[in-house]
């Protein structure tokens, strides 16, 4: 399946949807982020690359609320969000897909998505706090029915009609990656953070994941920040690339420009070919 090239569908410039200014993170004197400046325009697809330990996941952790910066700040849609809890940031319209799978392997595909749907529906309607299990399986029956219908529709629209009742643990790793992505789309976010979405999958599965991301973005116009190690895959998908090294931004620009930057080649040994 051929990858969709989104670079020709460049968003109009304007006020940033996400703005990181002088973001710093350190742990016991070890610097993870050394003053990151980064912004994303509405509807943009931004790729973030860098060698291991360059600060890519730390940056995503700050934006999604899992790390609190030790300096600087993050603004989303005009609101300061650094210091908010992850669930508060999700409620504002930022969703995250983790590098490691977080599916319930013993639940079916539709049940996995239904849980995410029910949590998002409950949050948007002000349902009192309750455990996911209680909310989905014992309480809020109307909420569960609506979540089920939405989960089925989402899965059917994305090629999983034949796997609704399949246990998530029996799917291929690539299929499970796709389900993880669909769970994040239960309540479509304004900004989706993807941390190495092709980690651990084959080239063919990576292309399927890429097609899923590209198609969904084309339908919704969602803004994407993608951390990825497959340079060819990411350069085909992203409109702009930011390169991190030792917690700092060392380059940014169009994929073809960044690919030929001497400093990037020195810091990040790689090519446009998947590896």
Image (cartoon, rainbow, N blue to C red):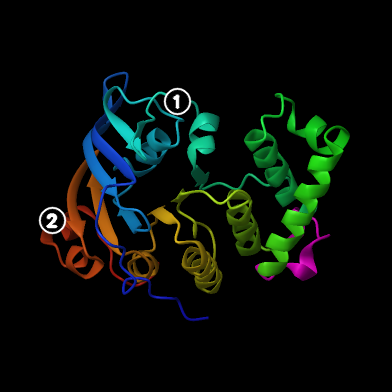
The span shown in magenta is 158-171
Residue under the image location 79 percent in, 33 percent down? 135
Q: In this rendering, does residue 127 appear at all? A: yes
| Residue located beneath label 1 in the image | 84
Count of picture labels: 2
Q: Indicate the secondary structure of the residue bearing disc 1.
A: loop
Residue under the image location 28 percent in, 25 percent down? 30
x, y percent for residue 59: 35, 39
Point out the tag, 2 or 1, that comes first from the N-terminus.
1
179 or 203, nearer to the observer: 179
Residue situated furthest bottom in the rendering: 2
90 or 240, nearer to the observer: 90
Q: Which class describes the residues within 10 Å of circle 1: few (<14), some (14-19), or many (20+)?
A: some
- Separation of residues labelled 2 and 1 (CA atoms): 35 Å
x, y percent for residue 51: 29, 50
Is residue 211 left or right of 52 when viewed as pictured?
right
Q: In this rendering, does residue 53 appear at all? A: no
| Residue located beneath label 2 in the image | 263
């Amino acid at each position: 399946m051929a990858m969709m090239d989104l670079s020709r569908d460049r968003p109009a410039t304007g006020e940033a949807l996400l703005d990181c200014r002088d973001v710093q993170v350190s742990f016991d004197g070890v610097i993870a982020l050394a003053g990151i400046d980064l912004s994303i325009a509405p509807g943009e697809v931004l790729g973030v690359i860098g060698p291991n330990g360059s600060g890519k996941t730390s940056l995503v952790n700050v934006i999604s609320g899992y790390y609190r910066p030790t300096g600087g700040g993050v603004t989303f849609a005009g609101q300061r969000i650094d210091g908010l809890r992850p669930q508060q940031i999700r409620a504002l319209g930022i969703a995250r897909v983790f590098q490691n799978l977080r599916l319930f392997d013993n639940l079916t595909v539709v049940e996995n998505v239904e849980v995410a749907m029910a949590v998002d529906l409950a949050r948007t309607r002000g349902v009192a706090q309750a455990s996911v299990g209680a909310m989905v399986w014992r309480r809020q029956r109307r909420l569960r029915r609506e979540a089920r219908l939405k989960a089925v529709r989402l899965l059917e629209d994305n090629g999983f009609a034949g796997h609704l009742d399949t246990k998530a643990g029996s799917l291929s790793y690539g299929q499970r990656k796709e389900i993880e992505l669909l769970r994040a789309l239960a309540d479509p976010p304004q900004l989706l953070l993807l941390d190495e979405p092709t980690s651990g999958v084959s080239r063919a599965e990576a292309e399927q994941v890429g097609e899923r991301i590209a198609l969904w973005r084309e339908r919704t116009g969602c803004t994407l920040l993608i951390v990825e190690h497959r340079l060819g895959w990411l350069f085909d998908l992203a409109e702009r690339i930011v390169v991190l090294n030792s917690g700092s931004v060392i380059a940014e620009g169009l994929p073809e420009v960044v690919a030929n930057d001497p400093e990037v080649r020195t810091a990040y040994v790689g090519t446009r070919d998947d590896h």
